[in-house]
């Protein structure tokens, strides 16, 4: 089989019979028995008694059967001490986070041995194209981090977010510490960290154990989709699947691979179908969202390294498309409930805005109804398939073929 660099250097579009003309051997994460810390993390992941209500565990919203995403169609998860509150964003999947880089602005901040300087203002946005994905990776753009707004850098800090959010698991410091001292797994915890650990140490180690479980357990990153098998030359794509992949990668058609990278990387690792960057796409307002508020995304994440920079308002992290065909809601606010709606939005947002937005204040203003007008210039209007065009870049039939291809990204 071809090596990764050779595959990247040639056209690897599906052959006429659906075969991969340049198969590779994918480099997947190693599989080994879970460490003692990861086993502890697994017990914590399914422990409802950690929550303030006693009814929610991590697995309640990140169901293993749904690729660690919600197994229901709720736009916002239900939680709180009395289970009478709702979160404010759609719950993302926890899969494929083992390669998630920490947040940075530009290509070098995350690897600097000293504290990075304050980020410069965002550079003028360049066109993102599926034919040249490397250009944006080197630009001064926000990238990396966890949550929709990048506010956490590690799985350990990410786990603390929903655990202590009053609208979600609604746990307290005292309640979590008490549970950790008197749970069925407490003996294992104390064997790992010592019998005289403080409450702060107990909680920090519990969060670390949750992170280790997600890093080590193969179910969080199986790379077992039909597309992975095709990359390795083990299966053929149907005619519609192959055409969907071509349209996905074509910079003049779907241009999806500009942000959702579909190629094996130089190390031979399977594609994650994200560039880890942030985009302002102006998703329509979800009628279920809290009234009188805007979710500004990255600029309101509370990150000390960027502050409240208006140039980042409306930006949200580009998610992986792996297992997207099994999701029930899409975008940060769960406004869409099918891939068909998502495809229509990308292709028709700037051509038929009335399909997605409430009528604008006047005929000369932009229609975006979930972003204050002062931030409308941040919205991506240059990357295909966005932008004013005489006709859509994708026909309804072509959109359907891309959907067919996306089903090949579901893990089995």
Image: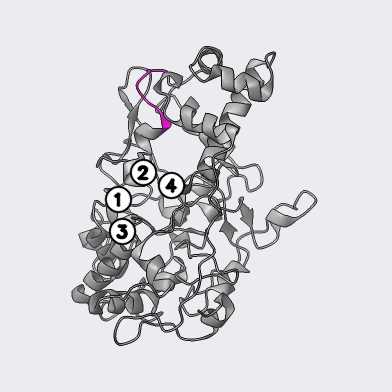
- Give the spatial CA distance, label 3 vs label 2: 31 Å
- From the viewer's perspective, is residue 213 above or below residue 328? above
Report the residue at 36% width, 61% height from top.
225
- Mark 4 and mark 3 lie on one chain; the one further toward the N terminus is 4
Residue 315 in the image: state x and y as whole percent.
48, 54
138 left or right of 335? right
Which span of residues is magenta-colored? 52-58
Kindly report which numbered mark, 1 or 4, lies closer to the viewer in this rendering.
Answer: 4
Do callouts 1 and 2 mark residues in contact (Cβ within 8 Å)?
Answer: yes
- Give the spatial CA distance, label 1 vs label 4: 17 Å
- Mark 1 and mark 3 lie on one chain; the one further toward the N terminus is 1
Kindly report which numbered mark, 1 or 3, lies closer to the viewer in this rendering.
Answer: 1
Kindly report which numbered mark, 2 or 4, lies closer to the viewer in this rendering.
Answer: 4
Residue position marked by numbered label 4 in the rendering: 219
Would you call the spot at circle 1 few (<14 residues within 10 Å), some (14-19), or many (20 or more)?
A: many
Residue position marked by numbered label 3 in the rendering: 367
Report the residue at 36% width, 71% height from top.
386
Identify the image quadrant of residue 249.
Answer: bottom left
Do callouts 3 and 2 mark residues in contact (Cβ within 8 Å)?
Answer: no
Per the picture, the main secondary structure of the magenta-coloured stretch is: loop
């Amino acid at each position: 089989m071809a090596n990764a660099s050779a595959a990247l250097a040639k056209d690897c579009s599906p052959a006429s019979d659906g075969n991969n003309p340049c198969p590779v051997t994918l480099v997947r994460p190693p599989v080994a028995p879970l460490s003692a810390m990861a086993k502890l993390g697994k017990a914590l992941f399914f422990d409802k008694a950690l929550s303030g209500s006693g009814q929610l565990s991590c697995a309640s919203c990140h169901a293993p059967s749904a690729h660690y995403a919600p197994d229901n169609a709720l736009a916002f998860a239900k939680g709180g001490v009395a289970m009478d509150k709702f979160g404010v964003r759609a719950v993302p999947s926890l899969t494929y986070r083992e390669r998630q880089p920490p947040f940075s602005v530009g290509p070098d901040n995350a690897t600097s041995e000293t504290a990075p300087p304050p980020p410069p203002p965002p550079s003028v946005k360049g066109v993102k194209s599926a034919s040249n994905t490397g250009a944006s990776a080197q630009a001064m753009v926000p990238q990396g981090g966890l949550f929709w707004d990048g506010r956490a850098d590690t799985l350990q800090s990410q786990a603390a977010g929903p655990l202590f959010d009053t609208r979600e698991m609604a746990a307290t410091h005292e309640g979590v510490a008490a549970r950790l001292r008197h749970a069925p797994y407490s003996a294992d915890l104390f064997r790992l960290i010592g019998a005289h650990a403080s409450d702060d140490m107990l909680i920090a180690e519990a969060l670390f154990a949750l992170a280790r479980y997600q890093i080590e357990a193969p179910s969080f990153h199986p790379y077992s989709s039909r597309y992975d098998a095709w990359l390795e030359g083990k299966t053929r794509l149907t005619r519609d699947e192959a055409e969907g992949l071509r349209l996905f990668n074509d910079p003049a058609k779907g241009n999806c691979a500009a942000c959702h990278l579909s190629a094996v990387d130089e190390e031979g690792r399977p594609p994650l179908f994200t560039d880890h960057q942030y985009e302002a796409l102006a998703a329509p307002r979800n009628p279920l969202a809290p009234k009188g508020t805007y979710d500004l995304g990255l600029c309101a994440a509370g990150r000390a390294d960027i502050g409240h920079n208006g140039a980042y308002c409306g930006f949200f992290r580009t998610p992986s498309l792996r297992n997207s065909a099994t999701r029930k809601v899409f975008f940060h606010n769960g406004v869409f409930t099918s891939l068909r709606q998502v495809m229509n939005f990308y292709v028709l947002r700037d051509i038929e805005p009335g399909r997605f937005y409430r009528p604008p204040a006047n005929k000369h203003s932009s229609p975006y109804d979930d972003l204050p007008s002062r931030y409308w210039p941040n919205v991506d209007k240059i990357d295909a398939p966005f932008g004013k065009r005489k006709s859509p870049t994708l026909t309804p039939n072509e959109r359907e073929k891309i959907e067919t291809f996306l089903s090949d990204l579901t893990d089995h």
